[in-house]
Image: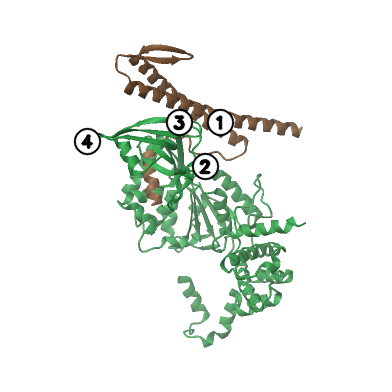
Chain colours: A brown, B green
Amino acid sequence: MDIEKTQQFLIQTETAAQEILIIKDELVALDFRRQKTREAFRALKNDMIPGEKAWMSVGNMFVKTRTLKAQNLLEREMKELDKDISDLHNKLKEQVKMLRDLEGKPELKGFDLQPITKEADIIMKALSK
Amino acid sequence: MAAIPSVKVAEVREFSRIERIGTHSHIRGLGLDDALEPREVSQGMVGQLTARRASGVVLEMIREGKIAGRAVLIAGQPGTGKTAIAMGMAQALGDNTPFTSMAGSEIYSLEMSKTEALTQAFRKSIGVRIKEETEIIEGEVVEVQIDRPATGTGAKVGKLTLKTTDMETVYDLGNKMIESLIKEKAQAGDVITIDKATGKISKLGRSFTRARDYDATGPQTRFVQCPEGELQKRKEVTHTVTLHEIDVINSRTQGFLALFSGDTGEIKSEVRDQINSKVAEWREEGKAEIVPGVLFIDEVHMLDMECFSFLNRALEDDMAPVLIMATNRGITKIRGTKYRSPHGIPIDLLDRMVIIATQPYEEKEMKQILKIRRVVFLSDLRETDPNYDFSLNRCEEEDAEMQEDALLVLTRLSMETSLRYAIQLITVANLIARKRKAMEIAVEDIKKAYSLFLDETRSTQYLKDIQDEFMFNEEDEQQSEVAMETA
């Protein structure tokens, strides 16, 4: 009876921990795409003559499109990536909270607050000097 | 078998992290189990089971933030562990809950009014939790490429290639970023972070993989791992600061200097009002949380009537901390009045408090405390006097340096005199034992110490016996008692 409970508990903890690792990997992959998209956007902006058409890969197909259109597409993609990453960060936070709860560790407080980076920076600088 | 002594040594060593030996430096918590049941001897606490259990309940309520603005009174005879319990509570609360400890007499100062001192103490006990969030780019520099204009002056442009163990990317840089890269002397192989919002570049060190690039490196070169994962990271940090700290920062232009010179002086009430409304605004917008802490006032009977009425008022504030007070007085005069009241505290304030009583220690408990103090004392000695030879008894029981019958004598002494006196005797007796080159404190050392140093009762007796020989003792007993009362 107790063994079954322990096993159940271990499964839960491990699943939660695994989920965190998955999210972290996903974040790395998304950031990779973000950087590459940004590079592509830069390249289109700097190295292309306006009005010329550019090759662009869509899935496993190369399409020749107008530069401006390609730029717009990339820009939209970057925005989406930023949003995805931000969502994933929040999901990661929730997951960590859940894991800590399962492990019986105290809750990490204050991470659901809205950031006040500028003020906090001033206060902490004043306190540490 | 061989493993056991080494475990015990480690246990004793634990204590040696305590920097200086204080009366309560052996206390690490309230010594409660998960169900808040007190263990007989745990975390440096001994006995006082009901009082400890009661404080455990209070503690749990503080943790849940349920009893902000309430007051707890720990009452008991001298030497029954009131301060010990308060210290235990402070330890159990941890670093993230503000805990201010003061003695009642601390509020009497020439530089500061009583209410100002109390207000500061209150505000030191209220924490504000805030969060910083920054997007940073962190990576190892692979290449810096700078295009300088042929004329020599004018805007530079360039490219910066950064990598982590998972990816590599190129950033186009403008003039400002290039300037700051040059200023930071960032070059290939350095690990840097760039704050996305401000563009500030800071160098973390050089990558380990580039450690062999040069034959000679400067002494300040720090080697770090190449960062892992994403290049652009989000960093969140939470801080808990006290209202008083924010007050001080804002009360003067060079405010933060004042915080550490100790002389904060009085803080204008306008400054406090401004900060209160700012914090309230932050709370409203979900930018800050209030962390009600604990204010501990020892010897609370030293406060006078004005202070008590101030406390009454201050406890009603919606940001008030939990107030814990301790007193060893019975029914006595409230300071500043001619009225008598239990514990020297006005009845109306007393009515707002939950009262925890401490009982005198029993013989068994006294012995236990003396044992603990013995260990604390020894570990302190170990740090301050490296020549003291511990090798003889290193592997024995932790209280081996005192013979069992010596401990018994000491315990009996502590029952007759006081616990504090007995603890003092440990230090003295140990010196005496060392003088006769003994490793253990024996009964004779305790006896010697007892004969050398008077306890309170014997000192009084001694004075009574020979007071005719002292100066200025014309007053008869009656008069001197009156003088004591008014003093």
Residue B85, how many percent across, how many down?
58, 56
In which quarter of the view is residue B175 placed? top left
**Would you name the residue on which mark 2 appears?**
B65
Q: Earlier in the sequence, mark 4 or mark 3?
A: 4
**Would you name the residue on which mark 4 appears?**
B151
**What is the chain letter for disc 2?**
B
Counting other residues with Cα less than 10 Å from the Cα at mark 1, is it few (<14), some (14-19), or many (20 or more)? some
Q: Earlier in the sequence, mark 4 or mark 2?
A: 2
Q: Amino acid at mark 2?
A: Gly
Instruction: For mark 1, give the secondary structure.
Output: helix
Instruction: For mark 3, give the secondary structure.
Output: strand
**What is the chain letter for disc 4?**
B
Residue at 66%, 57% in the rendered image:
B11
Q: Are marks 4 and 1 on the same chain?
A: no
Residue at 71%, 32% in the rendered image:
A7
Q: Is residue B287 visible?
A: no
* Front position among marks 4 and 2: 4
Q: Is residue B25 visible?
A: yes
